[in-house]
Structures are given as C-alpha cells and as structure tokens.
Amino acid sequence: MALILKLQDSLSKLGFVLGSTALGLIVAIYAFEVMSRYVFGAPTLWASDFVSFLLLISVFATAPWLTREGGHVAVTIVPDLLPRWRELLLRGGFFIAAAVCLWAGWICLGENIHLYNRGTSTLTTIRIPKWILSAFITYGLVNSGLYFLRLGFGRLEPEVSHA
C-alpha cells in the first residue's frame, strides 16, 4: 500500500509541476500577445485559445497536490466552535469532499469516453480533441478525491518528532 501512496504522491507532484509550468506559459503568451497586438499591430489568432487550455490544465493538474498539502478551501468555523466534535466534523467533511470529487470524476470519465468515441474537437481557432482537456478534469477530481479519503482516514494533526 505504501508503494501505491508513493506513486500517487509522485504523480501528483508531476501534475503540480505541469500546472505551474502552464501558469508560466500563460504569462509568457499574454506578454507575447500584448507585444504583438500593441507594438506590432498584429494580434495572434491562437493566444486566447492556448491561455484557455493552459488555465484548465493548471487548475486541474495542481488540485490534487494542493489537496494533499491542505491548500484546498476549508471553512472550519463550526469545528473550531465545537472542539469536542472537531475531529468527527473534519473527517466527515473530508469524506463528503471525497465522495463529491469521486462522483464528479466518474461522470467526467464517462464524458471523456463519449468525447473520444465521437471524435469531438474544440470549437476554437486551434482545434484539439476535447477528451484531452476533459481528461485533466477527470484526473484532478479523482486524484483529489483519493487525497480527501487519505485525509479522512489519516492523522488530522501533524506528527511531532521527539528527536
């Protein structure tokens, strides 16, 4: 089991690097578009499409790693106000989040298969198969759901080393 969890962590770290790179590319493409449009008077036809694609990739490729690191949005006012029920409420929230992510990922997987079988492409200047983009959504939802399960079954507080 430890090997599977390590593999998930490695895949998620790779996704985080990919998503971070996508954000860097968004900045570079926008800078290029501004220069092309306002300095050279020749706007690009592809920049907006690529920025949209890269934004989707950056969100869903980084989501699992951020979930692993506790970087997801967490409103903890109720558990904080009810310290006696804190652990139960937090674990319950993680399990609900896992169920929602895994359910949505299952729906997206079905849509990926449907898009692939139909050969559907984006309706953009740069046309690519839609299943490639929706696969990132499926990856982000399913992998985040698995991390929420790990959080639900794991330790809620960091371990203190007595070195």
Image (cartoon, rainbow, N blue to C red):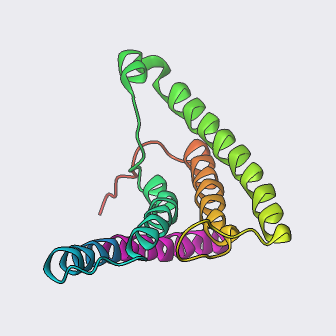
Q: Where is the N terminus found, in terms of image quarters? A: bottom right
Residue pictured at 43% horizontal, 57% vertical: 66
Region in magenta: 1-24
Q: Along the line of sight, which residue is nearer the eye, 12 or 91?
A: 12
Question: Residue 104: x and y, percent?
Answer: 69, 46
Question: Residue 127: x and y, percent?
Answer: 60, 76
- State the residue lying farthest toward the bottom: 40
Question: Based on the displayed image, in which of its 4 quarters is residue 118 positioned?
Answer: bottom right
Q: Along the line of sight, which residue is nearer the eye, 74 or 52?
A: 52
Above or below: residue 44 compared with residue 160: below
Above or below: residue 31 compared with residue 134: below
- State the residue lying farthest toward the right: 117
Main structural element of the magenta stretch: helix, strand or loop?
helix
Question: Residue 48: within the magenta?
Answer: no
Above or below: residue 106 compared with residue 31: above
Q: Where is the C terminus found, in terms of image quarters? A: bottom left
Question: Based on the displayed image, in which of its 4 quarters is residue 82 positioned?
Answer: top left
Residue pictured at 79% horizontal, 72% vertical: 119
Residue pictured at 66% horizontal, 66% vertical: 135
Above or below: residue 135 compared with residue 96: below
